[in-house]
Image (cartoon, grey):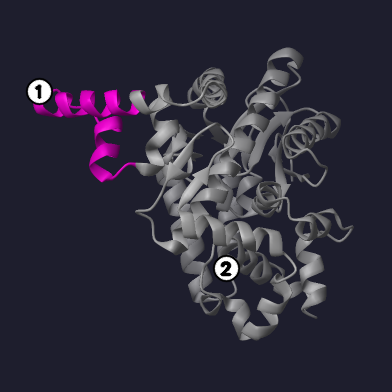
Amino acid sequence: MLEKLAFEMEFNKTEKWLISGKSDQSEVLEMKSGLLLDINRKIQELDDESKKLLNQYNDLHNELLPLVDNIEQVGIDFDIDKLRKNGKLLLDNSKSENNRYRIEKSLEKLLNSLEGSKLKTKLNLIGGVTHRITTASYNIQGLPNEIKACIIPSQYKRVFTIDFSAFEPSVAAYMSDDKALIAYLKSDDGLYERLLKDLNLSSDYRNAVKVCFIGSFLFGGNYRNFKLNEEVPEREWHNLIKKFSDYMLLKNQVITSKKLIMPYGIENDVSHLNDKKVMGQYVQNVSSYIFKHVLNKVYIKQCINESFRIMLPIHDAIMIECDTEEVAQSVANLMEETANSLFEDSFAEVTIEEIGGRDNE
């Protein structure tokens, strides 16, 4: 695990296969051994503080392994009768043939993924170069609320999802110490609502602004590839994001140098990456670092408190089961406190949504 955390972003496809794959061929084992020796040499050449930070991050992953085992063993239960009923209602109320087709395919995939009434989940704590936690089963995050309402807890009565608001922009603000971006995140309206006001757009465009802000501004995608360009001229958009000059400075420096300085003591050379991919991987990698610290704190509280259970980490959210909203709120408070402690500021915020449970409509 330590080797993947340290240098996977620098690996080519062959090296990734050597580290992750399984083979008994002597030639493969010899190449893998040579690669591991080279990586360990690089790790040993780190200064003491960098080694300490990397080892702490490796330890965090090991501390999360019992949680992964529990989540995989228990799985996610669905009320099958309710699932079929709510699925039919969704199909009957679909607004178009295209919408109906997407719902139908999504439900079909979910039903085919179930073992009886249970969705088995396989978690990967280091999901590719971004190190995000990934699932090798059905993606619950994209389910409609009517389908999420069919999820049944295993120990408690209610199911909640606690999700960070504007998590990647918050991480970007932390990375660049961009005071303008931090001010937008701290505003009473919230980041995307402030951006809507600046652009004189209604709330109907919130998702378009969110997708464009992350995909075009934070990650460096072409503005013209996002739907917002149909409503907002490119010049107007670029005039707006000029406010966030410190992040733009960081982005330019990183794209020029192709050096990613990670909070866990590693500097990755990503000179092999296309310019447009660099910041996306950088922000998502640091986001993973923040989120795993948050998840671990919540897991520690679960072990001590035993008033809730983590059902699944989903992207930047944590699905839990518990009996009361007060318990869910205490988890939400811990998530905010942990992220803000790492940010050394107070601009991380979460939302709580009840999505399922026993006798929940």
* Quarter of the figure with residue 208: bottom right
Does residue 92 appear anywhere in the picture?
A: yes
Q: Are marks 2 and 1 in contact (CB under 8 Å)?
A: no
Q: How crowded is mark 1: few (under 14 residues within 10 Å), some or many (20 or more)?
A: few
Magenta stretch prevailing secondary structure: helix
Tell me the residue that label 1 is attached to.
26
Q: Report, in whole angstroms, how far the alpha carbon at label 2 lies from the one at label 1.
A: 46 Å
Residue 288 is tagged as: none
Looking at the picture, does residue 308 appear above or below residue 325? above
Under circle 2, the secondary element is helix
Q: What residue is shown at x 53% (from left), y 80% (from top)?
A: 224
Q: What residue is shown at x 70% (from left), y 64% (from top)?
A: 245
Amino acid of disc 1: Ser
Pinpoint residue 351: horizontal percent, then vertical percent.
77, 46
Magenta region: 11-40
Tell me the residue that label 2 is attached to.
216
Q: Does the magenta stretch include residue 64?
A: no
Pinpoint residue 144: horizontal percent, then vertical percent.
61, 55
Q: What residue is shown at x 42% (from left), y 43% (from top)?
A: 129
Q: Does the magenta stretch include residue 37?
A: yes
Q: Residues within 10 Å of mark 2 (few under 14, many from 20)?
A: some
Pointer 2 or 1: first along the chain: 1
Looking at the picture, does residue 332 appear above or below residue 106? above
Pinpoint residue 34: horizontal percent, then vertical percent.
21, 26
Q: Nearer the viewer, residue 309 or 47?
A: 47
